[in-house]
Amino acid sequence: MIEACVDLRNGTNGEVGYKKRGDVLVVKLPGSPWGSDCEKIHQIVEWDDPALEAKLLAQQKAGQETPKITSPYTTYDADGNIITRSTEFMDVDDLPPGNNGKGKGRGHMMDRTNRVPKLKKNEFKRKTRS
């Protein structure tokens, strides 16, 4: 089991662009520190991906103090342009009001002044987009 930082903001390109709410931004090993943005603006969740977990453990074994993988599910075209920022994502519309990124705050972001508890994998729906 690993942890993921999931984007709760409305995409800066809108839902027609490649940035979408629920995108997985970063994954880390459990217990690794997260920045304040991940803990206040986004959502930390338990994430089950054995392949990514193996890569993170290999980074740790190679001496990286805090291994992380940024944009683990991003797909690109032949020219290196982003097609999909995150093929795996969390259904943020399934979260309770106030935790789903739909609220007034800093621009289009949530304004949470305190750290938000991590969600366990049975507390949200994980989906795949093509």
Image: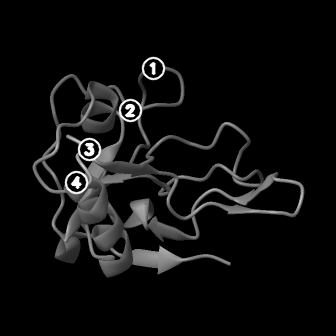
Q: Answer whether labels 2 and 4 touch (C-beta < 8 Å).
A: no
Q: Which residue is mark 4?
A: 60
Q: Is residue 81 above or below residue 110?
A: below
Q: Secondary structure at mark 2?
A: loop
Q: Answer whether labels 4 and 3 touch (C-beta < 8 Å).
A: yes
Q: Residue at x 30, y 79 (%)?
A: 50
Q: Secondary structure at mark 4?
A: helix
Q: Answer whether labels 2 and 1 touch (C-beta < 8 Å).
A: yes
Name which of mark 2 and mark 4 comes first in the sequence: 4
Of residues 82 and 57, which is closer to you in this image? 57
Q: Residue at x 34, y 29 (%)?
A: 37
Of residues 18 and 33, which is closer to you in this image? 33
Q: Which mark is residue 64?
A: 3
Q: Answer whether labels 3 and 1 touch (C-beta < 8 Å).
A: no
> Image quarter for residue 33?
top left
Q: Which residue is mark 1?
A: 106
Q: Amino acid at mark 4?
A: Gln
Crowd rating for badge 4 (residues with CA inside 10 Å; few <14, some 14–19, many 20+): some
- Image spot of residue 12 (x, y percent): 67, 36
Task: Name the image quarter holding the N terminus.
Answer: bottom left
Q: Is residue 45 above or below residue 113?
A: below
- Marks 4/1: CA–CA distance: 35 Å
Name which of mark 3 and mark 1 comes first in the sequence: 3
- Marks 2/1: CA–CA distance: 6 Å
Name which of mark 4 and mark 1 comes first in the sequence: 4
Q: Amino acid at mark 1?
A: Arg
Q: Which residue is mark 2?
A: 110
Q: Amino acid at mark 3?
A: Gln
- Image spot of residue 16 (x, y percent): 77, 55
- Marks 2/4: CA–CA distance: 32 Å
Task: Name the image quarter holding the C terminus.
Answer: bottom right
- Marks 2/3: CA–CA distance: 32 Å
